[in-house]
Image: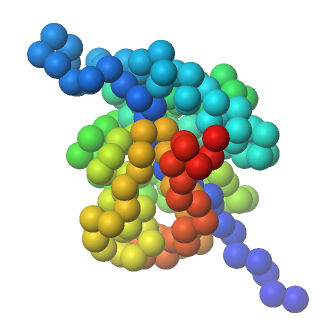
Amino acid sequence: MTKQAIMTQIYLIRHGIAVERNEDIKDETRPLTDKGRQKTTEIGQKLGEMGVKFDIILSSPLVRAWETAEILQKAKLSEKISEFAPLAPGGSLQAWVNWWLNSCYNKDEHSLALVGHQPDLGEWAELLIWGSSRDKITVKKAGIIGLTLPQTVTPIGQGELFLLTSPKWLL
């Protein structure tokens, strides 16, 4: 009997619809709009109906991402939520890989939500799947990319895509 490989499911989730950029508000503090909160709440409910649960939700520190993460937590998708600076725009995938190796490596299966921004989430997905960025994957606001990663010290290029959806298709 062969031992089954330990896998981690990663859900890369883009923040919901946020207030448009303007001179009066710093990018870091732009909140979700009412429509963004509503749509993100519906996404959280749908994921819950599908049986999705996260061991932890990691969020970019930017307000719109944090609000998205809080909505997912309120939908009872996870008890744990934590700010994770590398999920801010321009953040480091390697910093996340290091966190993942320290937190999840050689442990039971895990399911993680990473709430962040485009184009970074699309680029992270490409790096985890193909090992290089190809500028081909775009995540819509409140959209989701699902990847399965084997427990390996070098997950770059080892991921398998199991979900790529916009909110329109999920709802």
Q: Find residue 99 and report its horizontal and vertical position in percent.
A: 45, 50
Residue that appears at 27% across and 65% down: 135
Q: Is residue 83 visible?
A: no
Which quadrant holds the C terminus? top right
Query: Given the current orientation, which residue lies at the most extreme right position?
Result: 1
Residue that appears at 79% across and 40% down: 49
**On screen, 146 above or below 54?**
below
**On screen, 116 above or below 97?**
above
Q: Is residue 68 left or right of residue 110?
A: left
Q: Find residue 143 and report its horizontal and vertical position in percent.
A: 49, 45
Which quadrant holds the N terminus? bottom right
Q: Is residue 158 visible?
A: yes
Residue that appears at 70% across and 32% down: 45
Q: Quadrant of residue 163?
A: bottom right
Query: Given the current orientation, which residue lies at the most extreme top position?
Result: 24
Q: Is residue 108 left or right of residue 142?
A: right
- Display coloring: rainbow
**On screen, 166 above or below 48?**
below
How many labels sit on residues? 0
Between residues 60 and 145, which one lies in front from this camera angle? 145
Query: Given the current orientation, which residue lies at the most extreme bottom position?
Result: 1
Q: Find residue 169 and report its horizontal and vertical position in percent.
A: 59, 49
Q: Find residue 14 and report its horizontal and vertical position in percent.
A: 44, 41
Q: Quadrant of residue 8?
A: bottom right
Between residues 109 and 65, which one lies in front from this camera angle? 65
